[in-house]
Amino acid sequence: MSKDIKITKGLDIKLVGAAEQNTSKAVLSNVYAINLNDFHGLTPKMVLKEGSEVKAGEALFYNKNKEDMFFVSPVSGELIEIERGARRRILSLKILADKKQETLANSILDLENASKDEVKAYLLKTGCWPFILQRPYAIIADPDANPKAIFVSGYTTAPLAADLDYVLQGKENELQAAITALGKLTPGKIHVSVGKSSKSPLAGLSGIELHKVSGPHPAGLVGTQINKIDPINKGETVWTVSPQDLVIIGEMLLTGKYNPQRTIALVGSSVKKPQYYTTKIGTEISTFLYASGVKEERFRVINGDVLTGLKSRQDAYLGHYNNMVTCIPEGDDYEFFGWNKPIFNKISATRALTFSWLQPNKKYDLDTNTNGEHRAFVVTGMYEKVFPMDIFPMQLLKACMVNDLDQMEQLGLYEVAPEDFSLTEFVCVSKQPHQQIIREGLDYLQKEIG
Amino acid sequence: MSDKRLTFKKRLHIIKHHYRGKKMAPAFNALHTFLFTPDETTHSGSHVRAADDLKRTMNTVIMALVPVLLFSMFNAGYQYYAAIDAANGVIREVSVFGNFLTWDNFWIGIIKVLPLVVVSYGVGLLVEFIFAVIKGHEVEEGYLVTGMLVPLIVPIDTPLWMLAVSVVFGVVIGKEVFGGTGMNILNPALTIRAFLFFAYPTWMSGDKVWVHEAVERAGGPDAISGETILGYLAQNNASEYTYSLSDMFFGFIPGSVGETSTFLILIGGLFLIFSKIASWRIMLSAVIGALVMGLMFNGVVDQGWIGDTSKFYGLMSFPFWQHLIVGGLAFGIVYMATDPVTGAQTNRGKWFYGFFIGFLSVMIRVFNPAYPEGVFLAILLMNVFAPTIDHYVIRGNIKRRLKRLKNATVLPKDSEGEEKELQVETA
């Protein structure tokens, strides 16, 4: 049975540089890296020392607070660098890949008869667990929690997002294996969403509750779907997994091998030939970036989409959860009388001499300029137009800014992740850092209440 | 040309970086961002941002006020000459191109209205700059709109020193002590207006202040009338004024500088709604509120509960919908009630907030014959209550969330199935 979700509030940000449905194999990277910033709030503890040899799928480090949660290497090779920052905090790990790749072969789990604890222990040991995220707090799932449901969003609305229907083609077996395993971890349902008219392989899976979603961004964000399907209450936990990570989990369950390969979209107006590449987690972005070519010298590489991705350097590495890399021009230039002249080449949610409302289907070439300066919250009612959850966005942001725990709880901070505030941040005329405010609020809430 | 601008841009950029962190930097930056949208790029969160900033928002409101300002400059002269004619027994018929849009009229506007605008902006922005420099934050754009509103809501002959004192009071006490733009509780323009009214009551509350020179000439042989329609009504002298309905709607009547033309205010309001800058909810509900209160008063008169000897008769029997086209009600609803900082901030709250502004404006107007212009008091009152309204709207959301929590099937907290009862808060 499928249930339809129709989102009306929101805003589609249509940009130039969508990926053509054409996949190339990216050149193999010499060095692979794991960026610890991808795992928010994690305290890593190294298993291996600098200089050790490691196989693909072999543990590199574990979670200091959950010692059976391992993080594994994407490739076989030599651990050449442990980059540390202030107070010796580990920032990233770099692995020099071997010419001949060796993958650690785990025993294969008997999925049909495995118990909940066996599935859990298997995923923790094999390095697949970190793909499972949880709410509240938007962090890696706590294996001891008892989630009331698991959500998988197979519908993307983010700007220039990879087409999941396309990249998941032929992955039915892996997806089904992962869903079967996850089904044992929750007493509740696994909610899977697909686009209204999509031919996603996700739709044919068994053991799921299928939802057909339509509407503008943020309809595709899993947080929006949770809010509409089964909102999180205080004390409850839900888990979320992205479909491409399900494939990696599924392959592990079927073959016993960790295969961090995924099809990623290289997009954005700075890319000459935006298209799809198959590559591995942790690969150097330059291995495919220059295959497609770039148009200008000053551009920004974003690990992820333009609303939620991580600002990266050109010699950065593909993030652990990302299935896309966006390149857009830097906007570090002044604009003469930019605040009062009519604007035709930028997106706006208003009509204050901004004319994006005239051409709703036009694709824009936006740069990273803030188009204004940071100010106090002034305008009201604007966030609500792009925020479909049953939450007061501005009031929640203010509660986070003043660390008011009662208000944070009451106004629904448990239900959101920073990405849910990416669109309010986009339209904000006061240019407030919404996602950062929500992230700091979540961290504070977790520290105080846990 | 473009080459020159490039070097100018570069030069400003160098100055900006040279003086970064210095005391006067906010003052320089304020002027700089007026010329150039900064070269700042996004650091965290969304990498791209929408085209609008606060300056653009404020500028849109100012654009909606420009027609009103221009009209008021002509009307200042027109009312002056019409009053002189009336004193000589000649009743003028308005003719837009004949006797309204004339240089003579506009000249009165230039010598009387323009100085109000200059003093309002000059003094207000000076205070803003001083505070920005002292507190080391950027100059925020809030005063751009306030500075334009203030000259439009005062009587034409307001002495400039009075205006300057009021502006200082309004900006400091009404806004800066709360932390500046975005933090204030009361609408700064109305705080200035209220200060002017209560600090100089002998000047402000007379019935002669609404037309240029009416006060100076009072009592003399060449005395002219400076009375507004509401003033006539408050004195039960409805038969004495000669303005037609179209005069009232198009604004050829005496009143505060910019409040008279309901027609242009309506156009400005529609522009603000279309551009999605001001809340249509507040405007619509305020109109409804005013109509409801007006109908109730009309009903009282129709029922014969008060006679034409009552001191309220003039205003109570005034047709309910005409309240919208005389006095400052329309101006207040469109430009002042919709201030997002001091108004209700939730969409549902805006309905209540707007409704009570309309409702109370007409009520104050009728019951306070000494000062029939109730709209500024009504908005200030509702400014104070806006957080309370929002509180109850948000309470509703919180209650819904708690109810959901109550009805939820509570799962055991950890996977071992230990039955740990969750504490359900039902505050």
Image (cartoon, rainbow, N blue to C red):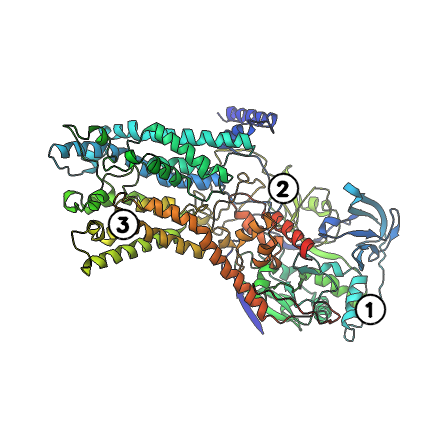
> Is A49 situated left or right of B404 in this image?
right
Q: Which residue: 38% across, 33% down?
A: B166
On the image, the x and y values in percent for residue B185 come to 46, 44
Indicate whether B33 appears above or below B11: below
Question: Circle 1 — which element?
Answer: loop
> Around disc 1, counting alpha carbons within 10 Å, would you say few (fewer than 14), some (14 to 19), or many (20 or more)?
few
In the image, which disc is placed on residue B367? 3
Task: Classify 10 Å Cα crowding around label 3: few (below 14), some (14-19), many (20 and above).
Answer: some
- For the point 38% across and 36% down, the residue is B148
Chain letter behind tag 1: A
Q: Which mark is residue B159?
A: none
Question: How many marks overall?
Answer: 3
Marks 2 and 3, how far apart at CA: 56 Å
Label 2, on which residue? B43
Q: Quadrant of residue A84?
A: top right
**Three-letter residue code for mark 1:** Ile
B82 or A195: which is nearer to us?
A: B82
Report the amino acid beneath label 3. Answer: Phe
Which quadrant is home to the C terminus of chain B?
bottom right
| Marks 2,1: beta carbons within 8 A | no
Q: Is residue B18 visible?
A: yes
Q: CA distance from mark 3 to mark 1?
A: 85 Å
Look at the numbered disc 3 and give the secondary structure of its residue: helix
Q: Chain of mark 3?
A: B
Vertical placement of A52 versus B174: above or below?
Answer: below
Q: Same subunit under labels 3 and 1?
A: no
Name the residue tied to disc 1: A108
Where residue A180 sits: x, y (%)? 72, 71
Locate residue A61, reporting x and y percent.
82, 53
Q: Are marks 2 and 3 on the same chain?
A: yes
Identify the element where label 2 is drawn: loop
